Image (tube, rainbow, N blue to C red):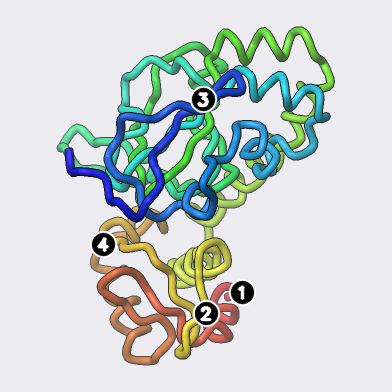
Amino acid sequence: MSPPLRSQPPLYTEGAGRASRLNSPPFCSLLLVRSRTVPPTAEELLQSVPLYRRVPPDDRRRLAAATTVKVYAKGETVFAEGDAAEAFLTIAEGRVKVFKMTPAGKDVILELFGAGDPLGALAVYENRPYPASAVALEDTVCLLIRKQDFFALLEAHPALVRSLLAGLTRRLVELTTRLADLTGGRVEPRFARLFLKLADQMGRPVPQGRFIPLHLARQELADLTGTTIETCIRIMSRWGKDEIVRTEKEGFTVLDRGSLEALALD
């Protein structure tokens, strides 16, 4: 394990209203942690996540008492396929890749999840192992609520159930839309919609356009759009020449959003 960076605050887990140090690799980039001397409490993080934002304050405090805040370093496994689903996880900050390994040993990306998204919720609800693996694409903060505590709170406080259902329904609609994007229409519009989504979710302004700080190999882009790597290479090469999207070492730059929007409607 590398020694901690002196200019950075320590890592923390937090539950039952107390903060304690987390024995994890140095964590250097989370604004929620770095921007303050005292780490954010579980209740503050819960309030920042859309899934829990509509939960009444009293219920949110009950959730916070049962919540552990855990930091995953870039590249660290959040859970592996086949692991027991023992906790309800929600991303407070960062980004996670969920993927499944094929019989041939190839990883296929199923989805990219970001701040506010629940992880592996279905496995928790159905009391079965995780059907896929999850890895942090960047330094990531997750909220973990033990399965037993989570269900006990739901049974005791019906208003909490209604609030959480609203958040989960929103996510279900998004996943349904993504499935339609993957299975219908031409490939190039699917690529355009993917890059528009990434630009909106994580892009930051740069002089040439909008930079997406996420490295994805051509095969990973092909997986996310339901096509072959050959088709992906052709599209990305043409977009680079036409100055629509440029591939960078650490991500992508959207140079011509108007062209992407027109392609997305095709």
- Mark 4 closeness class: few <14, some 14–19, many ≥20 residues within 10 Å: few
Task: Give the residue at mark 3.
Answer: 68
Residue at the disc numbered 1: 265
Question: Where is residue 237 drawn, in percent x and y?
Answer: 29, 81
Tag in front: 4 or 2: 2
Q: Which residue is drawn at 59% across and 78% down?
A: 261
Give the x, y percent position of residue 212. 43, 69
For image coordinates 43% across by 67% down, the residue present is: 187
Question: Which quarter of the rendering shows the C terminus?
Answer: bottom right
Q: On the image, which quarter does residue 23 sit in?
A: top left
- Camera-side residue of 228 and 6: 6
Confirm or deny contact between disc 1 and disc 2 (CB under 8 A).
no
Position of residue 220 measured from the top left corner of the image (x, y, whole percent): 30, 56
Secondary structure beneath label 2: strand
Calculate the distance from the C-alpha at mark 4 to the C-alpha at mark 3: 33 Å
Q: Mark 4 or mark 1: which is in front?
A: 4
Sequence order check, earlier mark of 4 and 1: 4
Q: In 3D space, how far apart are the residues under numbered discs 4 and 2 (Cα atoms)?
A: 22 Å
Relative depth, front residue between 121 and 211: 211
Q: In this view, does 55 lie above or below 178?
A: above
Residue type, label 1:
Leu
Q: Is residue 41 above or below residue 179?
A: above
Residue bearing mark 2: 205
Q: Which residue is drawn at 30% across and 69% down?
A: 250
In this figure, which residue is indicated by the disc labeled 4?
A: 217
Dot 4 and dot 1 residues touching (CB under 8 Å): no
Lateral position of residue 253 relative to residue 115, left or right: left
User: In the picture, which quadrant includes the N terminus?
Assistant: top left
Q: Which of 129 and 71 is in front in this view?
A: 71
Q: Which is nearer the N-term, disc 4 or disc 3?
A: 3
The reply to whether residue 138 is visible in this rendering is no
Q: What residue type is labelled 3?
A: Thr
